[in-house]
Amino acid sequence: MSAQHDALIRDMGPDDVAAVARLEAESYAFPWSAGIFRDCLRAGYYCCVAEDEGHCIGYAIMSVGAGEAHVLNLCVAERCRRRGLGASLLEQLMEFAGATGAREIFLEVRPSNAAALHLYKTRGFTQIGIRRGYYQAAGGREDAVVLRRQLTGMR
């Protein structure tokens, strides 16, 4: 695989929900349903997809309001990981959040997801807490690491 991706990142629409839900189900043991993705679109969350040759290979969802943004979901197809696509999706979210006037961006990540933790920390996110039992897991519940990044001065 190449070191870079050639994916197009664009706004998600209702026609993307089935492909996004499929990718979610392939990627997570406890995936969001198609209905949750539809609800995110209806709620006006910022939703984008990464596509390559017409195929959905990644997506990201973020809520923005009251001067802050919250990354709700970011996923890259397994076969496309480690090529910079996750970083590009995250940059897209941060640019959008900054353009709306958000001053900071938050997210939760599983402590067992070393690749995601590395991505976020290399993009300036710092740990501000732990949410105990936040995620559903095979053995019961898994904590979440809460991360924050200031967006001030990004524009």
Image (cartoon, grey):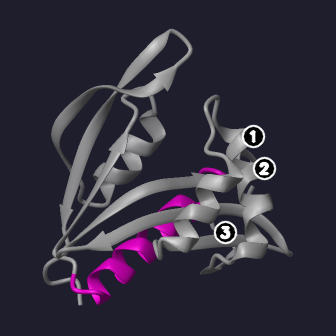
Query: What amino acid does circle 1 point to?
Result: Glu
Residue 98 sits inside the magenta stretch: yes
- Residue 33 appears anywhere in the view: yes
Indicate the secondary structure of the residue bearing disc 1. helix
SS majority, magenta: helix
Q: Residue at x 43, y 34 (%)?
A: 114
The residue stretch that appears in magenta: 81-101
Up-down relation of residue 47 to residue 29 (above or below): below
Q: Residue at x 22, y 78 (%)?
A: 102
Residue 84's x, y, as percent?
A: 55, 62
Indicate the secondary structure of the residue bearing disc 2. helix
Q: Earlier in the sequence, mark 1 or mark 3?
A: 3
- Quadrant where the C terminus sits is bottom left
As rendered, which of 4 and 128 lies closer to the eye? 128
- Say few, some or many: other residues with alpha carbon within 10 Å of mark 2 (under 14 / 14 to 19 / 20 or more): some
In this figure, which residue is indicated by the disc labeled 3?
A: 5
